[in-house]
């Protein structure tokens, strides 16, 4: 099957502009909008999207504000938070995907992208019929094994304080995420500390999450400490989703180290699990 990639121009009402990566083949049976992990540019998922396209699943990969094709970069005088991501940017990419392919059948994401995909299902007025997650789960510290959960609250507070002090989180320098807007880190840290999805300008998303009832397909790398199965269980417990297929894949199954990011270099097995 011939697979092609192209960039779809998008713009939010506050002036932010970006391009979403669209990848499709000769046949389109389903359309997936994919939300990347924190700080990961859209183009990084091209191999993953191409594998899906060969199976008849067109993919539109969202571009985070502040990365890749985004017209803005986080700085002391340029900040944003979950409000802009959930109410402006992700709907913009969903609209571009619907305009390009006529519909969006599935929304999904990697890591934080999976969390905000679930929140977008709760907030979106359009009907999307399934949720796909890879290496994703709630960051709530109590949803992690004890050896990790005990130090997570301090880490969340430290990262939020660093973002505030520097004007944005210097993620590239410290080896976590990218250079992230302090508002995003503030909202993410709050969820990590409280376990709730709520943010200024968005409100409490929890009641609307409880109304989400779609089939879920999820893949977890077996050695991924950033998204253990307990954190995925906690995320999905917020929804009404009962049709769940969760695959936990080890290094042999993945053909790559079973961690948070290595699967992206060899995405075939992950795609097989999602596209069943």
Image (spheres, rainbow, N blue to C red):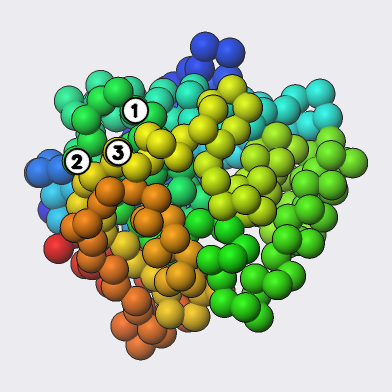
Residue at the image position 41 percent from the left and 85 percent from the top: 251
Q: Tell me where residue 204 appears, x and y as whole percent.
A: 51, 33
Where residue 10 appears, x then y in whole percent?
44, 22
Q: Residue at x 75, y 25 (%)?
A: 78
Q: Quarter of the image holding residue 20?
A: top left
Q: Are marks 1 and 3 in contact (CB under 8 Å)?
A: no
In the image, residue 8 sits, relative to residue 34, either above or below, namely: above
Pointer 3: residues within 10 angstroms few (<14), some, or many (20+)? Answer: some
> Viewer-proximal residue, 97 or 108?
108
First reached walking from the N terminus: tag 2 or tag 3: 2
Look at 23% across and 36% down and name the residue there: 128
Position of the C terminus by quadrant: bottom left
Residue extending farthest to the bottom is: 252
Q: Is residue 226 visible?
A: no
Residue carrying label 1: 124
In the image, residue 218 sits, relative to residue 269, either above or below, namely above
Determine crowd level at label 1: few under 14, some 14-19, many 20+ residues with C-alpha closer than 10 A. some
Position of residue 8 measured from the top left corner of the image (x, y, whole percent): 38, 27
Identify the residue under disc 2.
129
* Numbered badge on residue 144: none
List x then y, in percent, for residue 226. Answer: 56, 68
Q: Which residue is mark 3?
A: 211
Q: CA distance from mark 1 to mark 2?
A: 12 Å
Q: Is residue 181 left or right of residue 241?
A: right
Front-most of 207 and 276?
Answer: 207
How packed mark 2 is, by other alpha carbons closer than 10 Å (few <14, some 14-19, many 20 or more), is: some
Tell me: residue 136, above or below residue 83.
below
């Amino acid at each position: 099957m011939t697979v092609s990639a192209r960039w779809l121009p998008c713009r939010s009402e506050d002036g932010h502009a970006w391009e979403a990566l669209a990848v499709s083949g000769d046949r389109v049976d389903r359309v997936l909008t994919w939300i990347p992990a924190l700080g990961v540019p859209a183009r990084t998922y091209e191999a993953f999207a191409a594998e899906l396209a060969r199976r008849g699943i067109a993919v539109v990969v969202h571009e985070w504000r502040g990365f890749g094709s985004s017209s803005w970069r986080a700085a002391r005088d340029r900040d944003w938070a979950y409000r802009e991501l959930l109410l402006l940017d992700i709907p913009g990419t969903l609209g571009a995907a619907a305009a390009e392919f006529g519909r969006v059948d599935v929304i999904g994401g990697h890591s934080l992208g999976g969390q905000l995909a679930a929140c977008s299902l709760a907030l979106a007025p359009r009907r999307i019929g399934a949720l796909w997650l890879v290496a994703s789960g709630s960051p709530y510290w109590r949803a992690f094994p004890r050896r990790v959960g005990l130090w997570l609250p301090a880490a969340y507070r430290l990262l939020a304080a660093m973002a505030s002090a520097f004007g944005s989180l210097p993620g590239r320098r410290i080896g976590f995420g990218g250079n992230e807007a302090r508002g995003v880190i503030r909202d993410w840290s709050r969820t990590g500390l409280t376990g709730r999805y709520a943010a200024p300008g968005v409100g409490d998303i929890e009641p609307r999450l409880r109304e989400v009832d779609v089939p879920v397909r999820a893949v977890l790398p077996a050695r991924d400490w950033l998204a253990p199965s307990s954190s995925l269980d906690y995320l999905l417990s917020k929804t009404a989703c009962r049709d769940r297929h969760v695959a936990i894949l080890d290094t042999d199954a993945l053909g790559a180290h079973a961690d948070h990011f290595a699967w992206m270099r060899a995405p075939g097995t992950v795609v097989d699990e999602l596209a069943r």
